[in-house]
Image (cartoon, rainbow, N blue to C red):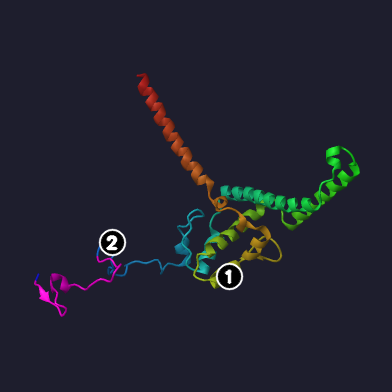
Amino acid sequence: MTSTETSNGYSGAAAEHARQPGGVPSGGQFSTATRREPDVTLAHLSDAEYNADGTFEYPPIPRSVEQLVAFWSRVRVPDAVMARVRSAYRENWSEWADARMVLWVADNPEPDGRRLLTSEKKVAEWDARYEAQVALLRAERSDSLPAVLARPLIRAAQMDRFGQWLDDQAQYDQVLATEIDLGQDVPFTARETLEEWHLDELPEAAFEDAGNYAGINAARTQVKLTELVELLSRDQE
């Protein structure tokens, strides 16, 4: 390589290369590189084609309101997920109701007669008021998630969860405006199902397909048992 002299007096092969600004790598895996456009992209796929390989546990990356709504409206919801969500719903309701009743009892103390075994009338009246308050909570928020509503409500909850991946608030609002058929004369929007049933308060683990993990773990256990039997057989020989 031929050395050349520059205007600042420096010479040598280094002068033939552009100087990199401080903090910018000039080589290695993080350096700037020119890449050609890919020959095949997913942009040309229809929503149906794009969604085809997705599952409840492994959905496609949301790319539009229409694609996301189409996927979560049709994907199979596993029975194991519905069972887990219904169980988590009951636990969430109990926690919510208990917190409300603690406040109620603080404002309406239990009569001393319960401890002293006196004033049975006051105790009975307090018990009746307590049960009436619990009934009001059940009227405000159902204490169980009906089996027939589990599937559509889970679809709405997943639309909400993955709708937050979209580019802006306007698209997210469009997702929440999707109508969800709950078998009533007036359809609910996805947003209204969350306000009514509060599935967005449940932990993400409630929406995992436990059956997948159970099957994998069972297969692994069987392999380990087989290996153990073979090992014991060799020891006995």
Residue under the image location 70 percent in, 66 percent down = 186
How far is mark 1 from mark 2, CA to CA?
Answer: 40 Å
Q: Which residue is mark 1?
A: 173
Q: Which mark is residue 29?
A: 2
Mark 1 closeness class: few <14, some 14–19, many ≥20 residues within 10 Å: some
Quadrant in the picture for residue 123: top right
Q: Viewer-proximal residue, 146 or 27?
A: 27
Q: Position of residue 76 (x, y in %)?
A: 54, 54
Residue that appears at 67% across and 49% down: 90
> Is 235 placed left or right of 212 in the picture?
left
Whether 135 is drawn above or below 221: the answer is below
Residue 72 vs residue 44: left or right? right
Q: Amino acid at mark 1?
A: Asp
Q: What x and y, as percent, mark residue 136?
A: 78, 55
Report the residue that reaches farthest toward the left.
Answer: 2
Left or right, 146 with respect to 156, comes to right
Secondary structure found at label 2 = loop
Q: Nearer the viewer, mark 1 or mark 2?
A: 2
Q: Which residue in the rendered view is the most extreme toward the front?
A: 9
**Which quadrant is home to the C terminus?**
top left
Identify the mark nearer the N-term, 1 or 2: 2
Range of residues picked out in magenta: 2-26
> How far across and how far down the image is residue 81, in percent?
57, 50
